[in-house]
Amino acid sequence: MSGDADDVVRFRERLGLPGIIDVHTHFMPERVLRKVWAYFDSAGPLTGMEWPIEYRHDEDERLALLRSFGVLRFTSMLYPHKAGMAAWLNGWAADFARRVPDCLHTATFFPEEGVERYVREAVEAGARVFKSHLQVGAYDANDALLEPVWGLLAEAGVPVVMHCGSGPAPGKYTGPEPVGRLLARHPRLRLIVAHMGMPEYTEFLALAETYPEVRLDTTMAFTDFTEDFTPFPVAERGRLAALGDRILLGTDFPNIPYPYAHQLDALERLELGDDWLRAVCHGNASVLFTVD
Ligand SMILES: [Zn+2]
């Protein structure tokens, strides 16, 4: 067992957790993942930050690592950057979920002709969670082509992890305003705001306070890396406590520039208590995804 795994196992054992559920991990076709890694290799020039990927391993090794950490369920967050890709990605993800039963079957979409049909097919095929990336996809969540998709997902109660905050890089359609308009039309949508909505933490917390089906994932938030450039406001910690049943562990494994356990330490040092940590790292997701 690696030193990494020792640290994660110690965290779990101290809390008495049977395992961890991580709602934000990336598995995708190998050649797409290589492109994502190439993007992070060049992210220094784009964002002013070095982004050395910690877990640049082949798929089997990445899966073995997550399991050695005691991660019981995880996702295969994938997302298209243009039209014509999403249905193909969904085919890959459905196959991945079949061969990797501890992965929650993940799907995605893009505002394009046919989107309602392939999203419906994915839901009927058992997709448990969707990913929407407004910055990479550069689309508006309020695009008319997506209107039936939001209705369908809200109706089916299938959560959507959405990269909608403007960090680490803003997009034309990121930020709380367009998401607020979406939720006003689809108040029951199970929206999971990725990265705690960074850097618009305050505004996305307000959306979660307004809409009971809105949740936030912790991905990369509170870590040393993120605190350096978009610190979470200390004054807002009380709101994290109050929303303790709607915050879900996410990590961005494997595309992270630090060891996995650092995300857990970053949550622990918020000092919101062991019950809060147990809910965030296991309980909330086990209810949402009905994991035993
Ligand atoms: Zn991610």
Image: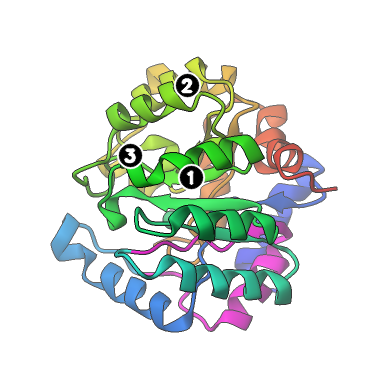
Measure the C-alpha gap from mark 2 to mark 3: 19 Å
Give the label, 2 or 1, closer to the camera.
Answer: 1
The residue under label 1 is which amino acid type? Val
**Residue under the point 28% across and 38% down:** 230
Give the label, 2 or 3, closer to the camera.
Answer: 3
Sequence-earlier tag: 3 or 1: 1
- Disc ID at residue 113: none
* Horizontal arrangement in the rendering, residue 22 relative to residue 177 (left or right): right
- Disc ID at residue 149: 1
Q: Quadrant of residue 74?
A: bottom right
Name above or below for residue 113 compared with residue 99: above
The residue under label 3 is which amino acid type? Gly
Residue 157 visible, this angle: no
Judging by the rendered image, the residue that carries numbered circle 2 is 237
The residue under label 2 is which amino acid type? Arg
- Mark 2 Cα-neighbour bin, 10 Å: few <14, some 14–19, many ≥20: some
Give the label, 3 or 1, closer to the camera.
Answer: 1
Q: Nearer the viewer, residue 72 or 94?
A: 94
- Mark 3 Cα-neighbour bin, 10 Å: few <14, some 14–19, many ≥20: many
Judging by the rendered image, the residue that carries numbered circle 3 is 165
Residue 217, horizontal then vertical, whole percent = 52, 41
